[in-house]
Image (cartoon, rainbow, N blue to C red):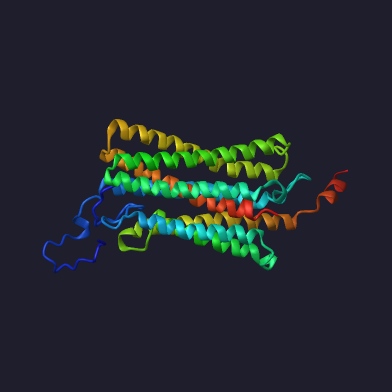
Amino acid sequence: MQIESEPQGQAPGVQEQGRATGRTYLVGLFYAVILTLASFWAASTNFIYAPGVPVLLAVLAIAQMGVHLVFFLHISSAPDQTNNFLALAFGTFVVGLVVFGSMIIMSNLNHAMMPMDELMRMQR
Amino acid sequence: MSVVDPTASTPGFVPLSRRGPAPIQAVVGYGFWLFLLSDIIIFAALFATYAVLSGETNGGPPGATLFDKTHVFIETACLLLSSVTCGFASLAVQRRDKVFAYLWMVATFILGALFLHLEWSEFAVMVASGNAPSRSAFLSAFFTLVGTHGLHVTIGLTALAVMLLQIETLGFSQKVRGRFYCFSLFWHALDIVWIGVFTIVYLGAR
């Protein structure tokens, strides 16, 4: 879309005119491929201390999401992107609340629940 | 050309309060961005469900024995490449270059369809071997999460086919370019969700 810079800010994914090139996507592809290969390697190798693998996978996934946001969706912290960036920050916050909140609550409930066999014995 | 804080002393300076409403493309793009973020929150709920239920196999096979990493790697490659071809297509649409727009859009469609085919064949094999969604809570959560993503890809492919037809019949009008731009945002967002899926579901399988 041909979009001039607007004082009210820009829509997400719109690059400033004259800077939108295929190069951006190719650089993004390069980083994404490296991070994807690293993820699949980390999941199948014995080279890394096993309990550390999930942490490494999480770091690689978050890095790749960042690469996609910057190079494919062209989200940046530029002044004309303030609205998009704030919306993204709020979305990330809600996602974190939903995912980690659910996991904490459910593991607490699991912890507090009586083992199934004991429960069955009581009902008899 | 960002907004470089024009000082009031600049001749022709208009204060923000008098600049009027934002242009329609910026408003539509921002609204679509908000929709995408709320869609990602739906996925967050499904991810949370999966994370809670992933160990509840009810004596059935766990994820580590069900999933084929090579298969998933090919799916990932398809979706990543289709994201890039979609980017090239949106550049071609910006240039109003019909030949390349079609070329990259068709490439995006083929890669997306290949992804769906691979996912469908994986589901079919799992269901045929008795590991249907009703087998265990883990499999219910798995089919819901991955199936919802697949459904989104299907919707995206439908939108892409409609865009191909609209460029043919309506040309590169302002409206059509705006629609294609929303589609490309949707397609890139789906790829971001897929990063979460392949990391948590397939690579994190125990």
Q: Residue at x 48, y 42 (%)?
A: B111
Quadrant including the C terminus of chain B: bottom right
B93 over B164 or under it: above or below: below
Image-quadrant location for residue B149: top right
* Residue lying farthest to the left in this orientation: B11
Residue A39 in the image, given as x and y percentages of width and height: 58, 59
Quadrant including the N terminus of chain B: bottom left
Which one is nearer the viewer's eye here, A61 or B93? B93
Which one is nearer the viewer's eye here, A57 or B148? A57
Q: Residue at x 46, y 59 (%)?
A: A30
Residue A79 in the image, given as x and y percentages of width and height: 31, 63
Q: Residue at x 49, y 41 (%)?
A: B112
Residue A103 in the image, given as x and y percentages of width and height: 63, 56
Q: Residue at x 18, y 68 (%)?
A: B7
A85 over B93 or under it: above or below: below
Report whether A43 appears left or right of B32: right
Whether residue B133 appears in this view of the structure is: no
A97 over B45 or under it: above or below: below
Image-quadrant location for residue A108: bottom right
| Total number of numbered discs in the rendering | 0
Whether residue A33 appears in this view of the structure is: yes
* Residue lying farthest to the top in this orientation: B169
Residue B96 in the image, given as x and y percentages of width and height: 27, 43
Report whether B188 appears left or right of B95: right
Image-quadrant location for residue B134: top right
Report whether A3 appears left or right of A63: left
Report whether A46 appears left or right of B189: right
